[in-house]
Every structure is written in C-alpha cells, then in structure tokens.
Image (spheres, rainbow, N blue to C red):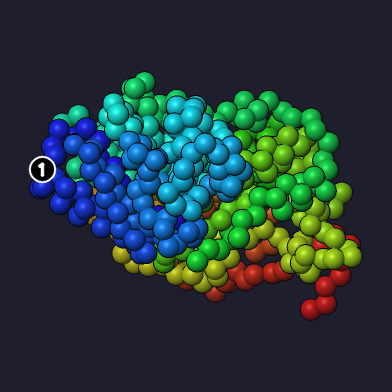
Amino acid sequence: MCGILAVLGCADDTQGKRVRVLELSRRLKHRGPDWSGMHQVGDCYLSHQRLAIIDPASGDQPLYNEDKSIVVTVNGEIYNHEQLRAQLSSHTFRTGSDCEVIAHLYEEHGENFIDMLDGVFSFVLLDTRDNSFIAARDAIGVTPLYIGWGIDGSVWISSEMKGLNDDCEHFEIFPPGHLYSSKQGGFKRWYNPPWFSEVIPSVPYDPLALRKAFEKSLGVKMVISGEGSDEIFGGYLYFHKAPNKEELHRETCQKIKALHQYDCLRANKATSAWGLEARVPFLDKEFINEAMSIDPEWKMIRPDLGRIEKWVLRKAFDDEEQPFLPKHILYRQKEQFSDGVGYSWIDGLKAHAESNVTDKMMSNAKFIYPHNTPTTKEAYCYRMIFERFFPQNSAILTVPGGPSVACSTAKAVEWDAQWSGNLDPSGRAALGVHLSAYEQEHLPATILTGTSKKPRMIEVAAPGVAIES
C-alpha cells in the first residue's frame, strides 16, 4: 500500500506551507518507501508516498491526464485496470500504472465512475480547470482514509491520522463506499449492494459458485490475507449462539460494515509498516455479493449436522481429488487473531496491564476517559498509549467501542446470558464453545494474576475425520 496526503483550499500557497505539507507527508514514509511525490496548484497540495507494485519504473505519483489538468494521488490497486484501459482507447496514457485510469475515467464520466473500479483504493482527484476536487474510498474500507477540516476552511485527506491530526480543527474517518465532492459540499454513498439493507437472502448454497468467486478475486512485495471471511460467514465462535438465521444475517451485515475500523485497519497498518501490501480476496465486491446472497440458514452452526463455524466456506474448498488443505487444518476450530499468535502472548499483555494499571486508576477511569471508558486494565493500558500520540478529541471519536465478547457486536452479547459478565475480545471468552475456554469460575482477570491452569491450543478434527494424536 501507499500513503497519500492532500491539503485543499488552505488559502496559503507560500513556501512555508509547502514545507509543512512535505513534513507531514514524511510521517507516512513507511507506507511507501519507493517514491515520494508532491504536486501543488495554488493553495492545493497533493503528496504521495509510493510502494511500487505495478509499473515500478514509471508509475510514480501524483498521476495526470494528457494535459495535466487532472491530478490524482492514489493508495491502492485497481484490479480491472486493463479492461478499463480498453474502454478508454481515445485517451493517451502517460504510465503503466493501474491507477492512471482514474484520471481518464473522470474525464469521461465526471464523478459517476467510482463503481466501475474493481479493487481496493482511496484517492484524491483535483480538477485544476475549476479547482474542484473529489475523494473516494473503496467499498469495504480496506485502505484507510481520514478527512479533516482546518480553521482556515481547508479540507485535509490522509491515509493515516498522523498526517492531519496536528493541523485540523476536526477530523474523522472517511466512510467506506463513499465519495466526497467539493462541488456537492459533502459525502455521497456510491456503494449500495443488496445485502446492505439486511433483508434475508434466499439463494441456495452452491459451493462451486462460491469457490469460483474466490478464485476470480485473487490478485498476484504483497501477501494474501483472509480478512472478512469470519464476518461474511459467521466464523467467530460466538456465532454458535446465534438464535436464528435472521439474527445471524443481521450480525454479519453489521460486522462487514464495521470492518474498516477493525480487521482492515489492523492488516493495513501491520503490512504498511513494513512496506508490504495485503491483498484481501474475501473482500472483493463480487465475492461478497455472492456470499451474502446465500440463505443464512446454511451459515448457521449445526453440530448435529456436522456443520462447524464457516462450514459453507470450508466445504467449498473440501476437494477429495485435489485437496487444498489437510482435513485437520480445513476443519479445525476457529482461533481468533490475538489467540492464534499464542495464548501466552495475550496473557502476557494482560499481566503487563495488571502490573501497570492500579485499582484506583480503574475506579477513576470514567472521569479520566468519559468517552468509551475502558472497563479492563488491558483496555486502560492501550488507551493511555493511544492518547499519548493522539490526544485530540477527534482522534478519540474515530475509535469504536461498546460491549463485546469474542469480537461480537453489542447486540450479539445478548445471545447468551453468561457472556454479559465475561466481556473479553478473546475467543476463549466464548464459554461453552471454545475448546480451551476460560473456566466459568475464572474470568480473564483471574488469569492475569497467575492461574496454574494455562489454556492450551487444541486441534479439532473435521466431522467424520479421525486424527491420530
């Protein structure tokens, strides 16, 4: 992934302002070690930190149309750029960059082209003919983006908060699937698939169609990551308690809509910090639409029928003749990200928080942190670290909160009465479900102080498959 920063309409075209924008852009250098670029037109600045994936020799940004009247800075990849280029045969392309199509599509279609893009992206486009601009973010929010407003009337757009938090009066998350237009003076949703309405679908489950949709979504410095599969297919362990298919479907819809604040942000930051790009095939628009059209009855976890979490996805890749994965991997129990790196890791973090956050600090938490008050010492510890770097109220408001167990929404906590007293992001908090769940009489706080019964990881066999120990 790359890093973008745009400062638009700041009423300051001095050398000092240019130096300041360059200084802020360098805060994003880790996102794009291959190239740094800047374009200034009057009081509008577009800067870019590039990680070269496609056309590394000549795809440096910002990008332009033929006469340079349209300027674009982009973070992301446009997977269908070759097909789009074929539709733009009357245009002359300056580079081989996949993102250059954005400038030419704008020339042809104005602001109404975003849905033609298949990929993950966030971009700012400046039309120097009238000094108007648009900004847009991909459907699910795989690429991060923030927008802010300066006291001088300027609009700031950045891949990370650190690019704008010191210079904006207010800033917030740029919503996924939206376009911001200076001409319209606000946001407009461009991505509105059928599943957004949360109406229960009724298409029968077809494993072959699901696998084909996945294979088509694979793109080839990058890594393939599985973000989105648990949200789409109800893979988290708390889905064992879903009371009916209607509740399950609504929960999956809410989880997908919130991905940009959780898993997508984590994956993007973790890879961008090391100059890598993560491709997320499960969050391809076509794949999501296919998967979310399946009757959610097929996503219900039914141990009596041999259906564990994410059964429809596992079954789609259960090929007896050409197996993708061994059975004991394909059908093992879901392990959440924080637990999967090792139980001792997360338990160690909790122990660290226990030794650094006192009971008195917790009793005053509601006064020190009135918004999204931390309810555990671990959360309090993370909050102190966050506010050390981002003390602004706008920054605090970008972070979601609310009751959760094993990564559930607040609504899903109501599915099981015993969860309300054991709110913890770990999958081990799914009492009665996880094979190494916290013992009911031992809440996570007890584990912090050193219980001798350390949970251990256990593999589970596929239904009907014996695994030798």
Q: Amino acid at mark 1?
A: Thr
The residue depicted at 37 percent of the width and 43 percent of the height is 64
Q: Could you say which quadrant of the image residue 286 lies in?
A: top right
* Position of residue 25 measured from the top left corner of the image (x, y, whole percent): 26, 53
Compared with 241, 425 (above or below) is below
* Position of residue 173 measured from the top left corner of the image (x, y, whole percent): 38, 39
Q: Nearer the viewer, residue 42 or 438?
A: 42
Q: Can see residue 232?
A: yes
Report which residue position mark 1 lands on.
Answer: 14
Quadrant holding the C terminus: bottom right
* Position of residue 266 measured from the top left corner of the image (x, y, whole percent): 46, 55
Determine the residue located farthest toward the top in the rendered image. Answer: 184
Q: Could you say which quadrant of the image residue 244 lies in?
A: top right
Q: Can see residue 365?
A: no
Label 1 residue SS: loop
Quadrant holding the N terminus: bottom left
The residue depicted at 36 percent of the width and 24 percent of the height is 186
Q: Is residue 278 left or right of residue 146?
A: right
Compared with 240, 32 (above or below) is below
The residue depicted at 48 percent of the width and 39 percent of the height is 91
The residue depicted at 76 percent of the width and 67 percent of the height is 325
Q: Could you say which quadrant of the image residue 158 lies in?
A: top left
